[in-house]
Image (tube, rainbow, N blue to C red):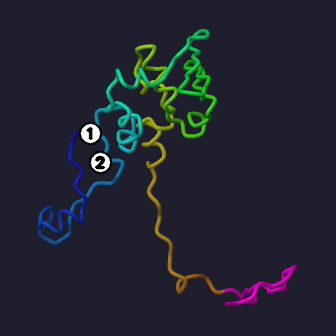
Amino acid sequence: MEKVVTRSSQQKKGEGTSKDGEGTFETPHESIKGVGNSQSPKWTKSKISGERKKPVCGFRLQWMLYPSGFQELKVRIGDESYGVNIHMKLCMCRLWQLSGVPCVHSVAGYMHLNREPDEGVDHWYNQEKWFEAYQFSIKPVYGSNMWKRTDLPPLLPLIMRRMPGIPRKKE
């Protein structure tokens, strides 16, 4: 993986400056082109990579898994029980649906099926989607002194009204 160097870090070291003193820097879109995986850089530091560092045997002993259909599992730990559907990317805790990143229960399911948990990551975390989102740059906004003047009256603040109920005593 290539090391990404920004303009500010180059200027601190005195590197990357041309004869006219202007530094060279990469846009976020250009800096990620050399990354080898299909997920965005933020994804590589997610919670699944933390789960991988845990010992697999201890992780499997902690969760009790009961297959109940095609890529459907019942995942138990103590009194808690969750249904996981690997094919539909669903978990009863709903963390997988909300974040797009497999929850702990689905990671246990993937490990039980001897599959990589990366397969369960939503397509929004792929590098192609990251490129699509950041392909356009954000244009700078002019300061308020550059705004167009109008003949309309200036906006006034809202009128404060007394709220219902007993007012609280000030200490």
Q: Which residue is mark 2?
A: 31
**Residue furthest toward the front?**
78
Q: In the drawing, does residue 15 fall left or right of residue 89? A: left
Pointer 2 local density, CA inside 10 Å: few below 14, some 14–19, many at least 20: some
Front-most of residues 64 and 110 = 64
User: What residue appears at the point 46 percent right and 38 percent down from the top-left corner?
Assistant: 125
Q: Position of residue 104 (x, y in %)?
A: 48, 31
Quadrant where the N terminus lies? top left
Pointer 1 local density, CA inside 10 Å: few below 14, some 14–19, many at least 20: few
Quadrant where the C terminus lies? bottom right
User: What residue appears at the point 47 percent right and 39 percent down from the top-left corner?
Assistant: 129
Q: Secondary structure at mark 1?
A: loop
Region in magenta: 150-171
Q: Which residue is mark 1?
A: 34
Q: Are marks 2 and 1 in contact (CB under 8 Å)?
A: yes
Predominant SS of the magenta segment:
loop
Residue 154 within the magenta-colored segment of the rendering: yes
User: What residue appears at the point 61 percent right and 9 percent down from the top-left corner?
Assistant: 69
Q: Which amino acid type is marked by label 2?
A: Ser
User: What residue appears at the point 42 percent right and 19 percent down from the top-left corner?
Assistant: 111
Q: Position of residue 28 (x, y in %)?
A: 35, 51
Q: From this view, report whether residue 104 is shown above or below residue 72.
A: below
Q: From this view, report whether residue 71 is shown above or below residue 20.
A: above
Q: From this view, report whether residue 76 is shown above or below residue 96.
A: above
Front-most of residues 105 and 96 = 105
> Image quarter for residue 84?
top right
Residue 73 within the magenta-colored segment of the rendering: no
